[in-house]
């Protein structure tokens, strides 16, 4: 089992490593001191202890980026401030430890994380959903997970992705139906993928690559559906 400990404080990294070895002597432990080190880590960890308050890139920002390439790792946040706890579950956190924590609390959370990690590793690979778009007579397969958001512009639909946009003539209503419950129509001209939401307010949705407008009457329903999406993601991780 590969376990990563990411904390900017050397003493905390060493303390957590000692506790891990006590309960899992054969663990492959990797100590990291920043979010950037975490994001360049290879191979990926099975369990991650992640500090929230770190300079440059804090734990929440690091966790969002980490989840883009590792959705199965069991994530445990380490924090000195309990108010961060409510944000933790937005990035699929399994649990959290508030500093200072007892040996008994660590043992409880870590043992549960090991069980969860074994279950997660045994999960079947989820089939990737996709759509076909037609451009200049050529049909192209586009995976839904890769679409951060879609917008209508000059009668075209633009699919915004991390590796480049895809433009085609089509109807947003048809795309909305094909995309399913992991997407939400925030505005007549915008359809967003919950997976790529970074932050939001009543005026706009910030995604990893760009911003989508939201019609104010739709904001309450967006929040409701986004919470449901997060619940679905947590349930799948725990199956």
Image: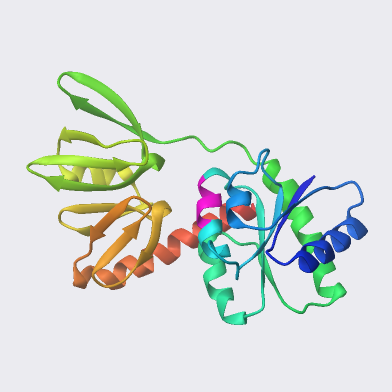
Residue found at the far left of this picture: 154
* Colour treatment of the image: rainbow
Tell me residue 222's x, y (percent).
32, 66
Q: Where is residue 68 in the image (x, y as percent from the top left)?
A: 50, 47
84, above or below 205, in the image: below
Would you identify the image quadrant in which residue 225 lies?
bottom left
Residue 203 appears in the picture as rendered: yes
In the rendered image, the quadrant that contains the N terminus is top right
Q: Nearer the viewer, residue 222 or 45?
A: 45
The magenta region covers: 64-68
Q: How many marks?
A: 0
Choose between 185 and 162: the one closer to the eye. 162
Residue occupying the point 70% across, 42% down: 121
Snapshot quadrant of residue 188 = bottom left
Above or below, 193 against 123 in this view is: below
Residue at horizontal 53 percent and vertical 63 percent from the top: 56
Q: Position of residue 64 (x, y in %)?
A: 51, 56
Is the residue 89 above or below the residue 131 in the image?
below
The prevailing secondary structure element of the residues shown in magenta is helix
**What is the x, y in percent for residue 47?**
72, 52
**Is residue 109 visible to us here?**
no
224 left or right of 24 in image? left
Q: Which residue is drawn at 44% across and 59% down?
A: 229
Query: On the rendered structure, is 92 left or right of 2?
Result: left
Magenta residue check for 226? no
């Amino acid at each position: 089992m590969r376990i990563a400990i990411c904390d900017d404080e050397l003493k905390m990294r060493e303390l957590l490593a000692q506790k891990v070895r006590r309960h899992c002597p054969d663990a492959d432990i990797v100590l990291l001191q920043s979010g950037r080190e975490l994001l360049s880590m290879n191979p990926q960890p099975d369990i991650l202890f992640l500090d929230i308050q770190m300079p440059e890139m804090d734990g929440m920002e690091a966790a969002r980026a980490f989840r883009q390439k590792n959705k199965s790792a069991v994530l445990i946040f380490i924090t000195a401030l309990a108010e961060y706890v409510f944000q933790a579950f937005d990035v699929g956190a399994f649990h959290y430890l508030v500093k200072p924590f007892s040996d008994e609390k660590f043992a409880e959370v870590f043992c549960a994380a090991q069980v969860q990690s074994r279950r997660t590793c045994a999960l079947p690979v989820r089939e990737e959903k996709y759509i076909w778009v037609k451009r200049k007579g050529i049909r192209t397969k586009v995976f839904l997970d890769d679409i951060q958001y879609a917008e209508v512009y000059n009668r075209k639909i633009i699919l915004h992705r991390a590796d480049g946009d895809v433009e085609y003539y089509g109807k947003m209503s048809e795309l909305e139906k094909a995309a399913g419950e992991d997407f939400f129509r925030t505005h007549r001209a915008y359809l967003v993928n919950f997976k790529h939401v970074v932050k939001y307010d009543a005026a706009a949705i910030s995604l990893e690559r760009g911003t989508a407008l939201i019609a104010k009457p739709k904001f309450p329903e967006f929040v409701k559906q986004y919470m449901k999406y997060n619940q679905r993601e947590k349930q799948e991780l725990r199956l």
